[in-house]
Amino acid sequence: MSIFEKINKNLDWGLKILKDMISIPTINPPGEKYKEFVYYARDTLKDLGMKTEIIEVPKDYVSKYYQDYSSYPRYILLGRLGEGKPIIHFNGHYDVVPPGSGWDTDPFEPIIKNNKIYGRGSDDMKGGIASFILTLKSFIENVSNFKGSIEIALVPDEEIGGETGSGFLTKELKIKPDYVIIGEPSSTNVIWIGHKGAFWALIEIYGKQAHGSTPWLGINAFEYMTKIAIKIMNEYKPILDARKSKYEYDDSRGAKPTITIGGEIKGGAKTNIVPGYYAFSIDRRITPDENIQDVEKEIIEFIEKIKPEYPDIKINIKVTNRLQPALTDPNSELITYSKLAAKEIINKDPKLTICLGGLDMRYYTENNIQTITYGPGALGNAHIANEYLPIEEFEKMSKIYLALLNKILRT
């Protein structure tokens, strides 16, 4: 029996693991059923011979980042097999977004129909987690000795930023594997070699509140807010439109840095009050070609430059979030191995692209760890009603992971 036939033999077992995991509604926010999930996953990994460890993230650490959810405990599960280097580390987040409306079936009672498995988390990303585990079972059944180590890290909270999952794992537990594969649903045809970052801020405008019957006694912060917003769109946005990343993106329009304003607006008190305060958000997306510190400086300098044009008001910029972009060198060992493994299964080179959204990759790449995001999925399926994962994708990706382990740990 070939090494890949082991995946076929164990496929029903892997699908049962996936169905069991979907059935545990690890909804985030706020962070439900985490303990139930990690104990189920721990027992599964232990049955395969892995050494396992469950780490509870300290409550004060959770409060630091996600105070509203700190009453819900957070857990990281680490499984290890083998000894020494190289260390191949599979990362998967087990939290899922709320199901929302529009489902034809119960989102947490998975069903298989038309060679697809339906349920919340099937695509994003319990499918990736179950694929790691199916790969591990098939590898150890076929290989008695191998060099190096295999790690599986199952983490919470990617859906709200990942600080108390992959962030805690890398910053506090200081893990530093050689190669990291994050099983988010890129599809078998696409390897995400990086992702965009983001700089978020509020532009605050302070005017002077007054009664609506005597508006000449006030300074309308809303009116000035609209002027400043228009100035950003007319003068700053064209600067971004003239730039283009050198990397390939899933959507070619994503190759440019972007800015979105007004996603959040604060201010105003009552219809008959001249508003003395207004604020609007900016969401500046950062390509891996850019530096987040330079982006922050650029925006602050733009706001400082326009301040003299509005002497009657106070303008302030309040930073609300900084998310680093991520990138792994397309010529790195991990990507070279991954391309070879993928071609062995899908008979073509996968595309190497930058993910438009944010991922947990940045926690690893910030530590100079070779990292890719590559997992089974149907593009556009994450977070939707009737989320599903094609079983063919699940099977192919498990074989690709198996080929990757074979190339790195047996050569």
Image: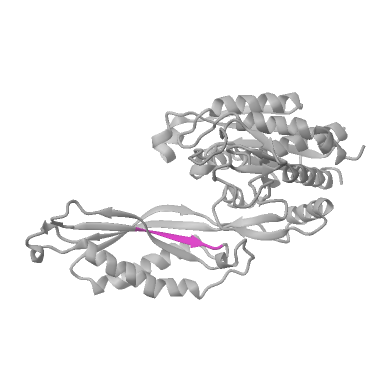
Q: As drawn, is 2 to the left or to the right of 186?
A: right
Q: As drawn, is 235 to the left or to the right of 397?
A: left
Q: Nearer the viewer, residue 104 or 315?
A: 104
Q: As drawn, which residue projects farthest toward the right?
A: 1
Q: As drawn, is 334 to the left or to the right of 249?
A: right
Q: Nearer the viewer, residue 49 or 17?
A: 17
Q: Nearer the viewer, residue 329 or 260?
A: 260
Q: Position of residue 360 (x, y in %)?
A: 57, 47
Q: As drawn, is 13 to the left or to the right of 302?
A: right
Q: Position of residue 120 (x, y in %)?
A: 57, 38
Would you identify the image quadrant in which residue 280 lies?
A: bottom left
Number of dots carrying numbers: 0
Residue 43 among magenta residues: no
Q: Position of residue 284 (x, y in %)?
A: 45, 61
Give the vertical position of 41 relative to 282 (above or below).
above
Dominant secondary structure (helix, strand or loop) of the stretch shown in magenta: strand
Residue at 44% over, 75% down = 238
Q: Position of residue 215 (x, y in %)?
A: 10, 63
Coloring applied to the structure:
one colour
Q: Quadrant of the N terminus?
A: top right
Would you identify the image quadrant in which residue 322 lies?
A: bottom left
Give the vertical position of 147 relative to 72 (above or below).
below
Q: Which residues are magenta?
A: 281-287
Q: Please indicate, yes or no, whether residue 83 appears anywhere in the rendered image.
A: no
Would you identify the image quadrant in which residue 212 lies?
A: bottom left
Q: Please indicate, yes or no, whether residue 380 appears anywhere in the rendered image.
A: yes
Residue at 64% over, 65% down = 248
